[in-house]
Image (spheres, helix red, strand yellow):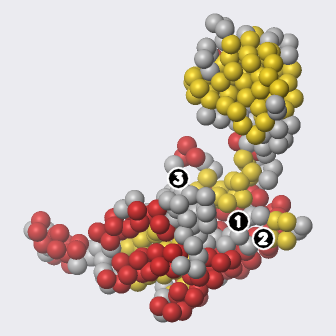
Amino acid sequence: MKRLLSLLCLGVVGTAFAASPAPHRIFIAGDSTAASYGPERAPQAGWGQALPRWIAGGWEVRNHAMGGRSTRSFIDEGRLDAIASEIDAGDVLLIQFGHNDAKREDPTRYADPATDYPRLLQRYIDVAREQGATPILITPVARLLYDFRSLIDTHGRYTLAMQVLATRENVALIDLNAASSDWIRAHGEDGAKPYFMHVPAQGKADGTHFSEAGADAVACLVAAGWRGLDADAPVKPVSAADCNALPAPPPASVSPSVVVQERDIAIEQPGPHEGAGTTTAYPFFSDATGLDLVFRKRALHPGATIGDHVNDKDEIYYVLSGRGRLLLGDTVREVGPGDAILTRDGDRHALDQVGDEDLVIFIVYRPVRR
């Protein structure tokens, strides 16, 4: 109705409008697992970004999902209001939250699964129904997280709360948590990694966010789940078995030997780990494949620091030039050219540039595997 009124006001409703009615829309409210990403974030993608491939003709996808959002912060930032201003009769609102609602340490996002989470989800349901649209709840997609060869369910209470709400309010529900867990188990822990952001060349081992292949497979699972609820759903005829069979990208070929000039890769950055001042980073071989090693040079300009932090991996620092003040555990000492520093996973350290000359270091480590 809102679209029709707008066209009437513009004086463009006529034969052309009758011949080409505006398509129905599928709106997505969700978090980073559903969000859209640009080519600069490749290969990362969200299932909402991939969903159009699985949608029938005459429908379009409006993906409002945004990284880091929960049911609470999505509303507080006005994102649900933005959907309410567009959504119309005949449209659909897909609602998937849970990953960030569980962040108890952040009151701007946390939603208790027994109270606030279903109460806030009810707001999304009400917005859709008030506009004549159809709400569909989607349980949070599973993480690739194994412990002793068993896949861990990190969303249990949120999945259950959404299921109870769907039953009480007579709202359609796609159990993506169950479907995606089955999908991961079908491939196994190592076989599922190419569908997630396990990208050694980028130093990433992320079991929450998807590669393009993973986003496509999860979008397929959403479509299959929707079709399982309604044989007339505006999705392609696909089953969970079809989605599970979608191929992962082939392993990256080993890149060739190469010579890199540091001036061509220099990146101006602030001090790492919230350190003060400015630095220049030289990310050697960041695009290399088949290399399970990260090699960096960093120049700490006068006043710059690597902030005090606890290591999440083993690292080696080697001082090329300049001088610095190193905090390692509870010990402080001066370091200079020729000093090599081994910092172990779980240890605390910081490094401050000292004097008028840049402190230049090499840093070597293996990407984190969590």
Left or right of 251, for residue 44: left
Q: What is the crowding at mark 2: few (fewer than 14 residues within 10 Å), some, or many (at least 20)?
A: some
State the quadrant of the N terminus.
bottom left
* Residue 27, quarter of picture: bottom left
Compared with residue 307, is residue 138 higher up or lower down, i.e. above or below?
Answer: below
* Amino acid of disc 3: Tyr
- Looking at the image, is mark 3 or mark 2 earlier in the sequence? 3
Give the percent coordinates (x, y) of residue 70.
52, 65
Give the percent coordinates (x, y) of residue 154.
71, 70
Instruction: State the residue at coordinates (53%, 56%).
Output: 67
CA distance for labels 3 and 2? 27 Å
Residue position for label 3: 37
Labels 1 and 2 touching (C-beta < 8 A): yes
Residue position for label 1: 143
Give the percent coordinates (x, y) of residue 296.
74, 27
- Looking at the image, is mark 3 or mark 1 earlier in the sequence? 3
* Amino acid of disc 2: Ile
CA distance for labels 1 and 2? 8 Å
Instruction: State the residue at coordinates (58%, 70%).
Output: 98
Residue position for label 2: 152
Instruction: State the residue at coordinates (84%, 41%).
Output: 345
Q: Nearer the viewer, residue 308 or 286?
A: 308
